[in-house]
Image: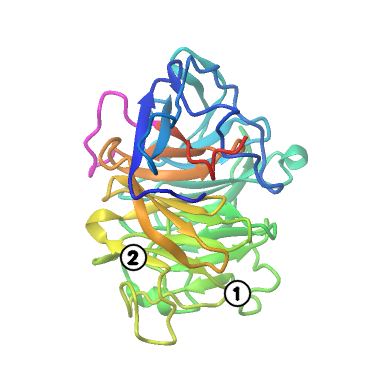
Amino acid sequence: MVVRSRRVRAVSGSLGAVLALTAACSFGPPDAEQQGTPPNLPKPSVAVSDSGAPEGDQEVAVTVLATGLEVPWGMAFLPDGAALVTERDTGRILQVGPDSDAKGLTVTEVQRLSEVQASGDGGLLGIAVSPKYTTDKTIFVYYSTAKDNRIGKLVLKGKLQPILTGIPRSADDNGGALAFGPDGFLYASTGDATNGTQAQNPKSLGGKILRMTTAGKPAPGNPIKDSLVWSLGHRNVQGLAWDKTKRMYASENGQPRNGELNVIVKGKNYGWAKADGVSTDKTLTSPLFTWPIADSGCAGVATVEQTVATACLLGKRLWLLNITDNGTVLGTPQALLTGEYGRLRGLVAAPDGSLWASTSNQEDAGDPGPDDDRIIRLVFSDGGAGRS
């Protein structure tokens, strides 16, 4: 998506009133590797248009899809277009959509995982749907116990089976992102569990991005044979995404001075705790972009066409970056929804090309409103992302 202005205007509405631009203005068809079909959203009664916007301005239609959630963390889509959403503190897996009513998409509790022991920023975190879900019906979750963080798999309403245990656990910095890459392997991000020495130790699972098979074993082609580690030197990655070129992006959360967006390359060292932000040490990989921590503290990451977006907790906004074909940032990143929905954590690209974001206001650092926590949907009216 080519952003035409440093200004981004948002137009908000309820699901039955203002809905993100229909076929005349959508993100376009999803990548062939994306799963699912669009949820059964009601037909909008008002279409948002940029025809009356100032020259170069871009409008964004924002729809509240679901309300009344409790710290939603991970989001992943089923083949029928429904989203599976984890709640960090309750240990619940919710299904959002594909059906809807006057209040928004229907929200149904699918399962509550008794194995989850939530405290601090630990609990039920990332979720990923098997690329072979239509045949194996399997999902994967990242979760905390009293002693460690784990990755497990299950068939919904069935027994949770751990496939990887012993990931360092602490009150803060537990990582938790979980996603299947374009190569079909499962990637997971772990926090350094407040101990920076773990992030630099290749034998520790803390402060890493891991790459594994669906059995929790090191994937073929990892930097070190028989090791799960794909990259190291991370403080607390909470978002993973790939663009159409298969370039991998990750947020970096919890550093004292800088929020980071990184391009993740096999075997690279991203600096923590030797560096916070850009480093002059040539053995370390510097971020694609950094922000002051007060403007970032970002978690979820998603990509659409030429744009990488990241959802921020401390910054209470989305950052949008336009990425060139060679992987550099074009122009100045743009802030969206600043302060309008509070703390933003989850961010995923939906099968229909829209973005879904979740708020995180029902936690100690938040200031919840009567509808929190919420899931919102965003569609841009910019011509680059609005092709039918």
Find residue 216 and report its horizontal and vertical position in percent. Answer: 63, 60
Q: Is residue 152 above or below residue 97?
A: below
Residue at x 24% of width, y 66% of height:
256
Q: What span is in magenta?
A: 363-374
Q: Which residue is mark 2?
A: 290
Dot 1: few (<14), some (14–19), or many (≥20) neighbours within 10 Å?
some
The answer to if 230 sits in the magenta stretch is no
The amino acid type found where label 2 is placed reads Thr
Residue at x 67% of width, y 30% of height:
80
Find residue 89 and report its horizontal and vertical position in percent. Answer: 37, 40
Q: Is residue 235 left or right of residue 44?
A: left
Residue at x 51% of width, y 77% of height:
268
Residue at x 40% of width, y 61% of height:
331
The amino acid type found where label 1 is placed reads Ser
Q: Is residue 153 left or right of residue 354?
A: right
> Which quadrant would residue 147 be assigned to in this image?
bottom left
Dot 2: few (<14), some (14–19), or many (≥20) neighbours within 10 Å?
many
Q: CA distance from mark 1 to mark 2?
A: 29 Å
Q: Which residue is mark 1?
A: 227
Residue found at the far top of this picture: 102
Residue found at the far bottom of this picture: 282
> Which quadrant would residue 366 be assigned to in this image?
top left
Find residue 60 and report its horizontal and vertical position in percent. Answer: 42, 35
Dominant secondary structure of the residues highlighted in magenta in the image: loop
Asked which secondary structure carries label 1, the reply is loop
Query: Earlier along the polypeptide chain: callout 1 or callout 2?
Result: 1
Q: How is the image coloured?
A: rainbow
> Which quadrant would residue 83 be assigned to in this image?
top right
The answer to whether any part of residue 116 appears in the image is: no
Asked which secondary structure carries label 2, the reply is strand
